Image (cartoon, rainbow, N blue to C red):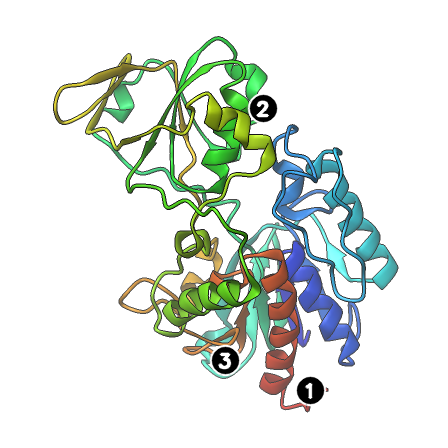
């Protein structure tokens, strides 16, 4: 029987695996990492080609490693290479591709082993570290008439670059960092309309470490109460970078409130105003990818998973990383260490 199964080999999963080995668990005999992707890199390998290492908001160094440098190289090439080298150098026991479908109590025992199922196989383990992030669960809100739209609808997850949208009118929906980034590059080759549910809150000063800690604490407080996690940017606000200032000068960030409904050729507001659209791009974020944990009934009535650090309050055999406040790369690293210690506590060992 395994001592722990880590589900996911992104930043959080690799960090957790590293710390589990550092604390004395043996690769393959005690710990295995199951990753749904066919290659290293987590969700980074699926991001659009125009996202460079200069565009990303910092990729933290994995434990005992160095952070990848800022450059004009594609993030979907650089980060997977870094992750792959880290796996090999650290001897991390990553098995892929294995998409975990279920984690359940073996024979219904609430204190006994867990059964992990995926890719036609099963693993029996005493603990699980769920590090599946959000990439596989894009969120697209429903609006009346969405099924009638004759143009193209896509989510950030399926965006591959501005060239495929050239010469079209694109309605970009969403008030987060992705919407701001995509509007800048799409507006160079297409006309755009920006729509958000709430008025964007812009920052004009750099984000300080103290503000960062306060923002993370607010997100963390929701998770401790079993509420669905919010993104950190919903607390921090938006700030234009140099590469987006030209778009701002062109008026790209003139925002409209949410439309009321979608029609075959565009969108309509409550006052009857219409805007033609060839494409609706939903930059509306993601939800935690935790459906595999459903058999354990971890959710609260409020819809979230209540955590004490990274430990699921309703089942201490389970650690969640890359969830809520640990969704950033820095947070994922810290959560990986916390989760490894949580695993050893569940196993009845002393964590160093």
Q: Name the residue under label 3.
A: 316
Q: In which quarter of the image is residue 169?
A: top left
How many residues crowd mark 2 within 10 Å: few (<14), some (14–19), many (20+)? some
Query: Which residue lies at the image location 76% right of the left edge and 38% below the top edge?
Result: 71
* Residue 304 point in image, percent of width and height: 36, 64
Q: Earlier in the sequence, mark 3 or mark 2?
A: 2
Image quarter where the N terminus lies is bottom right
Image quarter where the C terminus lies is bottom right
Of 275 and 137, which appears nearest the observer?
Answer: 275
Of 301 and 107, which appears nearest the observer?
Answer: 301
Circles 3 and 1 in contact, beta carbons < 8 Å: no
Which mark lies nearer to you, 3 or 2? 2
Q: Residue 351 carries which label?
A: 1
> Left or right of 104: which side holds 334?
right
Which mark lies nearer to you, 1 or 2? 2
- Gap between marks 3 and 1 measured at Cα: 15 Å
How many residues crowd mark 3 within 10 Å: few (<14), some (14–19), many (20+)? some
Of 294 and 75, which appears nearest the observer?
Answer: 75
Q: Mark 2 points at which residue?
A: 161
SS at badge 2: loop
Relative to 32, residue 351 above or below: below
- Gap between marks 3 and 2 measured at Cα: 42 Å
Q: Residue 54 carries which label?
A: none
């Amino acid at each position: 029987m395994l001592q722990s199964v880590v589900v996911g080999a992104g930043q959080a999963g690799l960090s957790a695996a590293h710390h589990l080995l550092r604390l004395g668990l043996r690769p393959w005999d005690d710990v295995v990492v199951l990753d749904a992707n066919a290659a290293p890199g987590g969700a980074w390998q699926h991001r659009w080609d125009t996202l460079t290492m200069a565009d990303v908001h910092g990729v933290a160094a994995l434990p005992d490693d160095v952070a990848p440098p800022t450059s004009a190289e594609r993030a979907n090439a650089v980060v997977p290479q870094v992750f792959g080298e880290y796996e090999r150098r650290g001897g991390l026991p990553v098995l892929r591709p294995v998409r975990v479908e279920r984690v359940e109590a073996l024979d219904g025992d609430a204190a006994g082993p867990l059964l992990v199922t995926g890719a036609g196989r099963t693993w029996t383990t005493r603990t699980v570290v769920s590090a599946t992030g959000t990439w596989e669960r894009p969120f697209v809100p429903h609006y009346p008439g969405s099924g009638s739209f004759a143009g193209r609808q896509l989510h950030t997850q399926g965006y591959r670059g501005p060239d495929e949208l050239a010469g079209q009118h694109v309605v970009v929906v969403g008030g987060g960092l992705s919407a701001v980034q995509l509007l800048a590059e799409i507006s160079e080759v297409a006309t755009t309309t920006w729509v958000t549910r709430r008025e964007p809150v812009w920052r004009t000063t750099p984000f300080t470490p103290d503000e960062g800690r306060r923002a993370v604490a607010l997100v963390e407080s929701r998770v401790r109460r079993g509420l669905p996690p919010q993104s950190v940017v919903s607390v921090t606000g938006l700030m234009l970078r140099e590469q987006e200032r030209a778009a701002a000068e062109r008026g790209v960030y003139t925002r409209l409130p949410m439309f009321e409904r979608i029609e075959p050729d565009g969108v309509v507001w409550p006052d009857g105003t219409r805007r033609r659209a060839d494409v609706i791009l939903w930059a509306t974020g993601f939800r935690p990818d935790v459906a595999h944990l459903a058999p354990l009934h971890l959710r609260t009535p409020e819809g979230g998973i209540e955590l004490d650090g990274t430990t699921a309050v309703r089942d201490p055999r389970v650690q969640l990383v890359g969830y809520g406040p640990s969704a950033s790369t820095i947070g994922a690293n810290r959560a990986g260490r916390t989760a490894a210690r949580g695993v050893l506590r569940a196993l009845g060992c002393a964590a160093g």
